[in-house]
Image: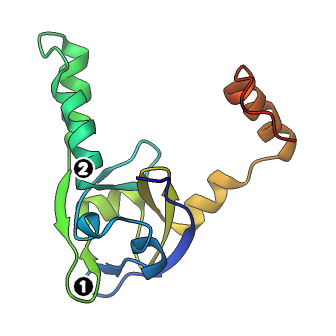
Amino acid sequence: MAALLGEFLCAVDNKNRVRVPVALLRQLPAAMQKGFVINRGFEKCIVMYPLNEWEQVAAKVNKLNTFKKENREFKRVFLRGATQIELDNAERMLLPRPLMDYAGISKEIIMVANGKVIEMWNPENYEALMNVDSDAFADLAEKVMGDDDENQES
């Protein structure tokens, strides 16, 4: 699967449903457009995994040695709230209230394509997170990507 792209502002209806934008769905192979797993993200967002991506993550998590306390703790917290969902005929998903509360989501969300997953954010939280000084971002880019000779963009 190619990397997903785009940011989409979406409304949450009074039944906690949100419609997945067509432009985002079109980026997924047809077989992946109905089934997903949503879960807590690391930075107070909801992460939506296409089923095949979730299966890879879950396999890695399930290989952790549960005789180690930190592995058990990570597994419990990481899997807390993970929910398999399907889109309805109107391409909407039902967001579980505990995940919405965790991410501070109420009436609107920003869906952010992030490689192989989709993050769902409270718009204010996302804007605050993305309000990064350009010099600080340049330093971060150098730190994260600078050792890779294949990535030589200006």
Image-based side of 99 in relation to 144, left or right:
left
Measuring 26% from the left and 75% from the top, which residue is drawn there? 93
Q: Is residue 75 visible?
A: no
Mark nearer the viewer, 1 or 2 = 2
Task: Locate residue 151, reporting x and y percent.
Answer: 73, 33
Mark 1 nearby-residue class (10 Å; few <14, some 14–19, many ≥20) = few
Q: Amino acid at mark 1?
A: Lys
Q: Amino acid at mark 2?
A: Asn
The C terminus sits in image quarter: top right
* Label 2 secondary element: helix
| Most foreground residue, 71 or 87 | 87
Image-based side of 152 in relation to 128, left or right:
right
| Most foreground residue, 57 or 14 | 57
Q: Is residue 14 visible?
A: yes
| Most foreground residue, 23 or 43 | 23
Up the image or down, 80 lies above or below 16; here it is: above
Image-based side of 7 in relation to 12, left or right:
right
Task: Locate residue 41, reporting x and y percent.
Answer: 39, 47
Q: Which residue has dot 1 on it?
A: 15
Q: Which residue has dot 2 on it?
A: 52
Measuring 28% from the left and 81% from the top, which residue is drawn there? 92
Up the image or down, 13 lies above or below 84; here it is: below
- Give the CA separation, mark 1 to mark 2: 28 Å
Q: Where on the picture, by quarter, is residue 127?
A: bottom right
Measuring 21% from the left and 88% from the top, which residue is drawn there? 89
Measuring 65% from the left and 56% from the top, which residue is drawn there? 128
Q: Where on the picture, by quarter, is residue 147?
A: top right
Task: Locate residue 14, reporting x and y percent.
Answer: 30, 87
| Most foreground residue, 95 or 52 | 52
Task: Locate residue 112, reporting x and y percent.
Answer: 51, 62
* Label 1 secondary element: loop
- Residue extending farthest to the left is 67
